[in-house]
Amino acid sequence: MALLSLSLLLPACAPRPTRGAGGASSLVEAVSRALSDPSLDHSGAALLVVSLDRGDTLFAREEDRLYTPASNRKLFTAAAALHWLGPDHRFRTALLSTAPIDGDTLRGDLVLVGGGDPDLAVADLVAFADTLLARGARVVSGDVRADDAWFDDVEWGAGWMWDDGPYWEWPYVTALTLEDNVVTVTVRPGAEIGAPTVVRLDPSTDYVTLNVAATTGPADGAPSLEIDRHWSPRENVIDVTGSLPIRADSVVARRTVEEPALYAVTVLRELLEARGVEVLGVARRGPLVDAPADTIGVHVSDPLAASIRNFLKVSDNLTGELLVKAMGAAREGPPGTYGKGLAAERAFLASEVGIDTTAQRLADGSGVSRYNLVTARQTVRLLEYMSRRDALFPAFLDGLPVAGVDGTLEGRMRGTAAEGRARAKTGTLNGVTALSGYVPSADGERLAFSLMIEFYVGSAAPRRAVQDSIVAALAGFRR
């Protein structure tokens, strides 16, 4: 399906519809008016809108200029992962032992082997602990080890910023994850003014040390609560300081943990001991080299389609990085690496989608890196291609946030023609906001669009308002 036929003789910033009569002409006027908003005066804005049904271009501006996609990068990762792994792919996490259970004693180590599951939860480790208990083990004579060798040990994507580290949006990347490699800290006021705040850690684990110095302030006082993780490498210490008014709502914050594979086996060891299983050794990292003596249990994840839905709906960065390495491991064998995974993605984009990958840059899987550079035309070409992949498109489309309904678009475009109809991926970094996806016109014509705005200072809110007005105009468009 052709998406091009645009004149190269027109100025790059001018809108260029291929059919300017009737409704299309009115659409161009409405979109051009939106793009003249003063919030974009010192910014760059790229937009391409095509009809998936007719193949014509309804609007084009700077569609071949490279922009930072932010989390629109996730569209490429999701599509490639569905292609290489398949929507029914399931991640496997195994609990193995180096020696059999002898009486009530497991005379060796327990080894938790990660397979890149982005959604492994404490409940899954509880199931492992309960299985071991049901098999009669009351003592583990060795250690509880973490095997995360399925991926390499590069913990962050290229171009990530060092000062983003403690916050949940930028967790460390490893083949053995637990709860997104973060802990959740909940702080609520104490019973009276001056009392310490009440702090809860989830999961409850000694892997993280809480230093609580925050107090309860007067009801009319200004909150000054700070929840900070120490910057020191390999130090999992969180300081809770400041003040929280006595009748204030609880404050919930998520903070990353250092060495997440070790975090996972520490929590497993604590779960075992809570069930009366004595572990004589320690929690540590250490791959399983020889064949295991026994398989205690295997956790099989939900299908990849479920991970894709979480990945795109809430814009989960860790999932994007894990999917890149999982693609690399699947295509070239373990360990999964950024090099292998990005090569697999480029091969998919070049041979299947028809994108010139020498004219873009992909650096990570989530869009956190500012090294990523794509064009609106490349993004729309991907959207058009996925709409024709019958086996993959349902999972891809289902993952996209729905305007005014869920995900990162839950609070946007309400009360417009786009509400409940537009499905699109958001993207946000400082000075960058992007929105790309699908919307049916008022006549039911399927449209694909990509709108990237960059090079601004201040809040993204007025730029998002421009995006929303354009998508609403597309939803109300009639031929």
Image: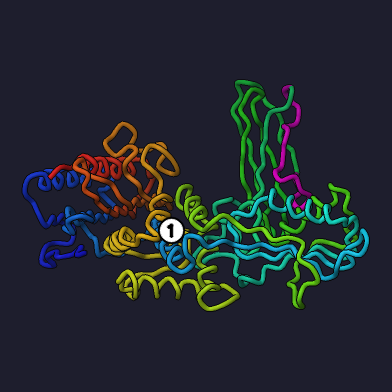
Q: Residue 43: say if magenta.
A: no
Quadrant where the C terminus is found in the figure: top left
Residue plotted at (42% across, 68% down):
362
Whole-percent x and y of residue 371? 43, 66
Quadrant position of residue 408:
top left
Q: Is residue 149 left or right of residue 329?
A: right
Question: Is residue 132 positioned above or below 196 on the image?
Answer: below
Residue 30, image x, y percentages:
17, 42
Q: Is residue 195 magenta?
A: yes
192 is higher (above) or lower (below) than 62: above
Residue 202 percent across, percent down from the top left: 70, 43
Which quadrant, please, contains the N terminus? bottom left
Closest to the observer, 260 or 341: 341
Magenta span covers which residues?
A: 192-210
Nearest the eye: 460 or 354: 354
User: Residue sitting at 32 percent across and 44 percent down?
Assistant: 422
- In the picture, measured across the screen, residue 304 lies left or right of residue 136, that is left
Res. 372 in view = yes
Residue under the image location 75 percent in, 77 percent down: 289
Position in image of residue 189 (x %, y %): 69, 28
Q: Which residue is farthest right? A: 103
**Label 1 sits on residue:** 74
